[in-house]
Amino acid sequence: MRHDSPASKLQKLIVVGDRLLIKPKSAKEQTKSGLFLPPGVQEKEKVQEGYVMRVGPGYPIPADYGLDDEIWNQDEKEQVRYLPLQAREGDLAIYLQRDAVEINYMGDKYFIVPQSSVLLLEREE
């Protein structure tokens, strides 16, 4: 029996289109003034932050056909091309919560977020 690590299981996920798989950053349980926040308060905020775990291929763009080229003469592998996304795996993303879809995968919470909902990326170079 083969046991895959959570990281390798995550690599098996294919994110489609212009979407990102984001693992939410752990919420602060205490405010700056010392008040303790109940679970769920941070989740209701309009803006969230988390780490980009997987990135989709991007925005599909039509194949570029010349005047003499016919669609039935094109190789099928060349027909689908993508405009890549700005986000990369490992980036810290600030995104709008309203557009995120929450999923649970292998006991962890993730969000699937379209790139258009990402407000800011922080990248360690």
Image (cartoon, rainbow, N blue to C red):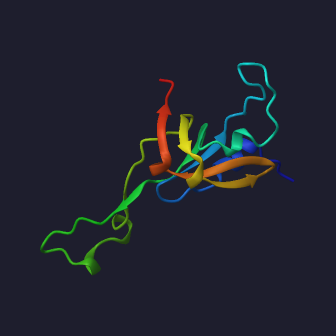
- Does residue 80 appear left or right of residue 8 in this picture? left
Q: Position of residue 73 (x, y in %)?
A: 26, 77
Compared with 6, 37 (above or below) is: above
Of residues 21 and 38, the one drawn nearer to the viewer in this rendering:
38
Residue 7 in the image: x percent, y percent?
A: 70, 42
Residue drawn at point x = 49 percent, y = 49 percent: 117
Residue 25 relative to residue 94: left or right: right
Question: Percent position (x, y) of residue 74?
Answer: 28, 73
Above/below status of 19 relative to 26: below
Residue at (23, 65) in percent of width and height: 64
Number of numbered labels in the structure image:
0
Q: Position of residue 88 (x, y in %)?
A: 49, 39
**Residue in the foreground of this view, choosing between 56 and 7:** 56
Specify the farthest residue to the bottom.
72
Closer to the camera in the image, 51 or 81: 51
Which residue, as the protein is rendered here, is positioned at the far left?
Answer: 67
Residue in the foreground of this view, choosing between 75 and 64: 64
Q: Residue furthest right?
A: 1
Determine whether, in the image, residue 50 is placed left or right of residue 82.
Answer: right
Image quarter of residue 77 = bottom left
